[in-house]
Amino acid sequence: MKLGNLELDSRTAGLAPMAGVADRAFRELCCEFGASYVVSEMVSSKGLTMHDRKSRELLVLSQKERPAAAQIFGNDPVVMAACAAQCLSFAPDVIDINMGCPAPKIAGNGGGAALLKNLPLAEKIIRAVVQAVDVPVTVKMRLGWDAQTPVAVELAKRAENAGAAAVTVHGRTRQQMYAPPVDVESIAAVKRSVSIPVIANGDITDGLSAAKMLEETGCDYLLVGRGALGRPWVFSQIAAYLKHERVLPEPPLSEQMRVMLRHIQRICDYKGERVGMREARKHAAWYIRGVRGAAQYRQRVGALSSMEELEKLAFEIVKENSF
C-alpha cells in the first residue's frame, strides 16, 4: 500500500490510534513485534495551536517507531490546517484526521465522530489539511453516526476528492461504540467506491482474523486497536500468518510478564515512575486477562505504585500459574 512516497507491506498490520494507550512506549514496543506503521494518540487542534504542553508531548515521535502518523482532531478547517502545519515540526510521516472517535467529550464538541453528521464540513477540513502540509493526509472514520445514517461511502469519496491519500474505516457506527461485530460488508463497500487505499480496523485479534478481514473486504492494509491491548506480540502473529500461513501461539506466561515489565519500565523512563505506575495499572490489567486468579491480581494492580511491586506481582503470577 502506498501513501504518497510511503510504502507499507499489506502482509503486516499497523497500530491504530488509541487515546491514553498508544503512547510512545507502546508504539515502540509494537514496532519491535512487527507493527509496520503506528498512529499517535489524538491531538487537539485547538490545544496544539494554543501551545498546550500536553498536546505537544503527544506528538513526540522517535526513530524506533517509523513510519508514524500524527493524528489530529477538531471541527474548524482553519485551526485544523494550522495544527497540521505545526505537527510537521515533529516530522510525522503522515497526518491522520480523526473523524470517528465516539467519546462524548470529543464528539460532543463537534470533533471526531460528530463530523459524520456534517460531511460538507468534513470535506472542508480534509481539503484544508491537505493544502497545509507536504506529507500524505489520511482520514479515520466510522460507518456513520448510527445505523440510520450510513455515510462511510460518501465520506470516503469526499475524502478522495479533497486529496486524502487513504481512509481508515472502523466497521461500526458511533452509536455502536465497540459492542457488535464489525460490518465487513460496509468496509468492502467503501473499498469498491474509491481508488485510494482503504485501511480496515476493528475485531482484528490474530493472524486468522487479519486474513479474513483482508479477504472479505478487499482492503489494502489493517490497523489493530484493542486486539493489541496487553498483546503487542499480535503483530508478529499477523505477519507470520499473512506471509507464511503460520499460526504463532501466545507466548508463554513468563514471556508475557517479561514483555509487560519492559513495557511499563519504558513508560516510567519516558514519563517518570509516578505517572508511569499510574498508567501501568490499566496496561497490567490487560496483560493478565485470562490468567488464573486474574480477579485477585487486578485488585493488587489497582494499587501499584512502584516497579518493584509490579516485578513482585509478575513473579507471583508466573509461579502460581506454573504446572
Image (cartoon, grey):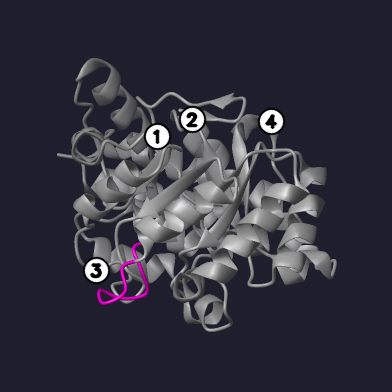
- The label nearer to you, 4 versus 1, is 1
Q: Secondary structure at mark 1?
A: loop
Check if residue 287 falls in the magenta segment: no
Give the CA distance from mark 4 to mark 1.
18 Å
Q: Residues within 10 Å of mark 4 (few under 14, many from 20)?
A: few
Give the CA distance from mark 2 to mark 1.
6 Å
Q: Earlier in the sequence, mark 2 or mark 1?
A: 1
Side of 46 relative to 321 (left or right): right
**Can residue 264 be seen in the rendering of this structure?**
no
Q: Which span of residues is magenta-colored? A: 143-150
Q: Secondary structure at mark 2?
A: loop
Give the CA distance from mark 4 to mark 3.
35 Å
Location of residue 201 in the rendering, given as x and y in whole percent from the top left corner: 35, 49
Q: On residue 63, which mark appears? A: 4
User: Mark 3 sits on what residue?
Assistant: 179
Q: Disc 4 vs disc 1: Cβ atoms closer than 8 Å?
A: no
Q: Secondary structure at mark 4?
A: helix
Q: Who is closer to the viewer here, 210 or 77?
A: 77
The quarter of the image holding the N terminus is: top left
Side of 172 relative to 85 (left or right): left
Location of residue 186 in the rendering, given as x and y in whole percent from the top left corner: 25, 55
Location of residue 317 in the rendering, given as x and y in whole percent from the top left corner: 31, 50
Q: Disc 3 vs disc 1: Cβ atoms closer than 8 Å?
A: no
- The label nearer to you, 4 versus 2, is 2
Up-down relation of residue 107 to residue 312 (above or below): below
User: Mark 1 sits on what residue?
Assistant: 13
- Residue plotted at (26% across, 61% down): 294
Check if residue 148 falls in the magenta segment: yes
Up-down relation of residue 81 to residue 261 (above or below): below
User: Mark 2 sits on what residue?
Assistant: 36
Q: Disc 2 vs disc 1: Cβ atoms closer than 8 Å?
A: yes
Q: Earlier in the sequence, mark 3 or mark 1?
A: 1
